Image (cartoon, rainbow, N blue to C red):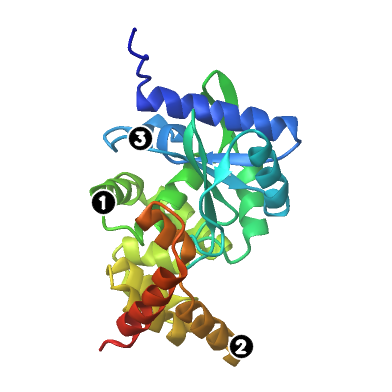
Amino acid sequence: MDSPVQVPTAVRLRMAHGCLQLLAEGAGLRILHLKGVALDPRLAAGRGGSSDCDLLVAPDQVEELREVLAAHGWEQITTFDRGSVFGHAAAFHHPRWGTADVHRAFPGVDRSPETTFARLWRAREERVLGGVPCPVPDLLGQRLLLLVHAARDRSARAAHDVRESWTRADAAERARLEDLAGELGGTVPLALVAGRPERARGGPDEHLWRALHAGAPPRQVWRARWRDARSPRARVRILAEAAAVNRDHLSLRLGRTPTRRELRREWFARWGRLLRP
């Protein structure tokens, strides 16, 4: 029997983006294709390959997109609320196309997800992926998204993004990035990746972004969130989230649904990590 044809990852991802765009268009939904193979070639050169698709969906169409994906064989493997400390994305998997991260907001420019999506959509461009014209942010928007993402990522790829989108940018481009970041609430993460930490002082979620940028362990990230909380209600919510076991992450780590005993053990271990000095 002949061996199955191995499709290169980059080709599969382009086809997956095209598939996702056709599904969204068919349902009258607006999505923007982010990062990876959807990047402008000027930002992608030398960055390294991607392993999944990233989408930003209009915030008022998140549930509709989830229903469309489920109806076409995409299994949701993580929830929005438990995907990260920002609760910004959920992962979906298709046996043919692989994994797609669907963002309902983008950390760092999420002060108003509706405003951010509208601003990026208004300036959108098109990139043909899998033979399908797909909406993507314009070059300025792509630069900003890469930079605020790099503020919580210490990888070589993040260093590449900072170098290409900030270090090598001229003064006029940097000014445009700072203006857009200010408009969308991204001043703090941009200040950190730009090497201007003093400009982050007193900004929204300053301590959280400083902890993430420094690669702090989870317990320090939770403490940073506590410091940033602006009301008693916000602190109660943080305590509740800290106490809860992240079933999504535990399931992915185990490769199966955890048992009650495993959930109890993880709960005690979680508190031990949080209370450790």
Q: Residue 233 carries which label?
A: 2
Mark nearer the viewer, 3 or 2? 2
* Quadrant into which the C terminus falls: bottom left
Query: Is residue 40 among what the camera can see?
Result: yes
Residue nearer the viewer, 264 or 46: 264
| Residue toward you, 202 or 74 | 74
Alpha-carbon distance for marks 1 and 3? 13 Å
- At label 3, counting other C-alpha atoms closer than 10 Å, the crowd grade (few under 14, some 14-19, many 20 or more) is some
Q: How far apart are marks 2 and 1 (CA)?
A: 37 Å
Labels 2 and 1: the sequence-earlier one:
1
Please identify the quarter of the rendering in which residue 13 is found.
Answer: top left
Residue occupied by mark 3: 44
Circle 1 is placed at which residue position?
A: 159
| Picture coordinates of residue 190, whole percent (x, y) | 40, 62
Q: Are marks 3 and 2 in contact (CB under 8 Å)?
A: no
Label 1–label 3 contact, CB within 8 A: no
